[in-house]
Image (tube, rainbow, N blue to C red):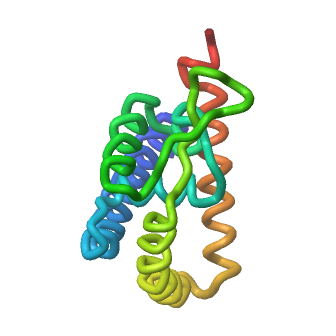
Amino acid sequence: MNSAEALSRSALAVLHLNGTFTALLNGLTLAAGLSAAQWQVLDTIGAGPQSVSGAARLLGITRQSVQRIADLLVDQGLAAYRDNPAHRRAKLLETTDAGKAVLAGIDPGLAELARRLCGELGGEDEFRRITEILGELSRALCAVGPQARS
């Protein structure tokens, strides 16, 4: 297989993986009233307050997508905006106690999914190795993508 074929196959595999992850996460998060996308943003800020732009960079999606989801989370009372000491206009988004409770309610389902996935993959070490490889692929794509050339 040449490198162009490898790129095509890897793109299709990752896109399929994204669809599968989204479907599985929706199955876990919809019962808590969140979509997989809402969970993704809430989980990201659950680790600590982030600007919308910062969360978008961490997630590898557009700022506008995160802004739309952030506003929904705030409307639901799961997140709140607060002043950002580093930037007057870019507020920080943080989880509320209600948001933390929703995340905690989803955690057992995530843990069970992780346990089953590790079993399918041959253990936690193998899962970690695959995750590291996916991270390497992501970093490499960012390095060669159009934004890297500007």
The picture quadrant where one finds residue 148 is top right
Judge whether residue 2 can be spotted in this image.
Answer: no
In front here: 111 or 142?
111
Judge whether residue 6 can be spotted in this image.
Answer: yes
Is 147 placed above or below 109 here? above
Residue lying furthest right in this view?
86
Q: Residue at x 40, y 54 (%)?
A: 13
From the viewer's perspective, is 40 left or right of 23? right
From the viewer's perspective, is 24 left or right of 112? left
In front here: 121 or 1?
121
Is 20 placed above or below 89 here? below
Residue 32: x percent and y percent? 31, 73
Residue 27: x percent and y percent? 27, 73
Q: Residue at x 34, y 60 (%)?
A: 36
Which quadrant is the C terminus positioned in? top right
Q: Residue at x 51, y 41 (%)?
A: 81
Residue 52: x percent and y percent? 52, 35
Is 123 placed above or below 103 here? below
Residue 122: x percent and y percent? 59, 87
In front here: 46 or 18?
46
Is 133 placed above or below 29 here? above
From the viewer's perspective, is 20 left or right of 103? left
Total labels drawn? 0
Q: Residue at x 46, y 48 (%)?
A: 10
Residue lying furthest top in this view?
150
